[in-house]
Amino acid sequence: MELQFLKLNVEKQVATVLLNRPDKGNSLSPDMLREIGDLFLHLKTREDVTVIILTGGEKIFSAGFDLDYVKEMKLDANKEFVENFWRAYRSVRFCAQPVIAAIGGAAMAGGFDLTQMCDIRYASERAKFGQREVMLSIIPALDPLCRIIGFGPALEWGLTARDIDVNEAFRVGFVTRIFPEGTVVKETTEIALKMAEFDRTTLIETKRYSIDLMHNSMDASMKSHEWLFANFVGSDENRFRINSLLETIRNRKK
């Protein structure tokens, strides 16, 4: 696949997708959004990819939509652009494999929304966030944000358009780990490589189950987990991994 605004590296079942418009703050142009949609739909089908990292590098994640493009757009001519960015977002959110955002710096507006679509968010100490859409007379994306941090904080972020530092993002659960400046991509890669050693199908089904939790009743979710548990416990892969763990424990005791 030919990419102009993204870089892709696949190694040991981990795909790293780098937003690659550094001269524009990794702003989300229509072409970049199109590449994100195409690439994640492609990665979804690849058996050699178990975990995906999405990052803008150690200095910035994304400044958001390309305002130089958006400022020229008319309301009656926005259909393709709107479809394009939601296709990109949905391709990340509903990608089969777990997607980890490695956030090295600012993730603003559309860039912040893109981090919402990831399953896990790790951030650098210098990272900051902002849902600035209301400043530009655009309705902010509050879902899945409200499912991640709760309705009250999500609405406050969306209505005030204020900057959110990484410590606040961690405190409300938007970010789950903070790493020293300049190390988030390296640390995220190490975690992803460890995850990639797990059974691929188990990771994919765990993600699918987590998405179902968002709209199922508690009873339906418990029944769903019962079905999944019954289809995995006692499997060849399950028994192999139990035996491997027990062997490791025995070796530690020697």
Image (tube, rainbow, N blue to C red):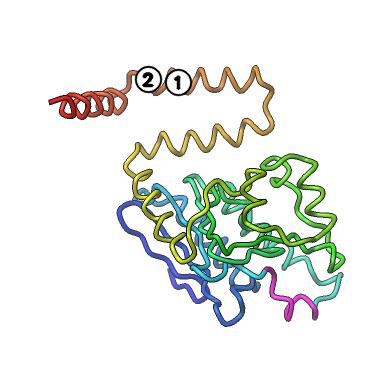
What element does badge 2 sit on? loop
Give how far across and how far down residue 35 sits, in percent: 55, 67
Whether 67 is among the magenta residues is yes
Pointers 1 and 2 in contact (C-beta within 8 Å): yes
Give how far across and how far down residue 108 sits, in percent: 68, 65
Q: Picture quarter containing residue 186? A: bottom left
Identify which residue, 171 or 229, lies in the foreground: 171
Label 2 neighbour load within 10 Å: few <14, some 14-19, many 20+: few
Instruction: Count the numbered circles shown.
Output: 2
Left or right? Give the position of 25 relative to 110: left
Q: Give me the residue at 27% from left, 28% from top.
A: 241
Give how far across and how far down residue 72 sits, in percent: 80, 81
What element does badge 1 sit on? helix
- Disc 1: which residue: 229
- Disc 2: which residue: 233
Q: Give me the residue at 38% from left, 51% from top.
A: 49
**Residue type at the position of mark 1:** Phe
Whether 134 is among the magenta residues is no
Which numbered dot is residue 183? none
Left or right? Give the position of 49 relative to 226: left
Magenta-drawn segment = 64-71
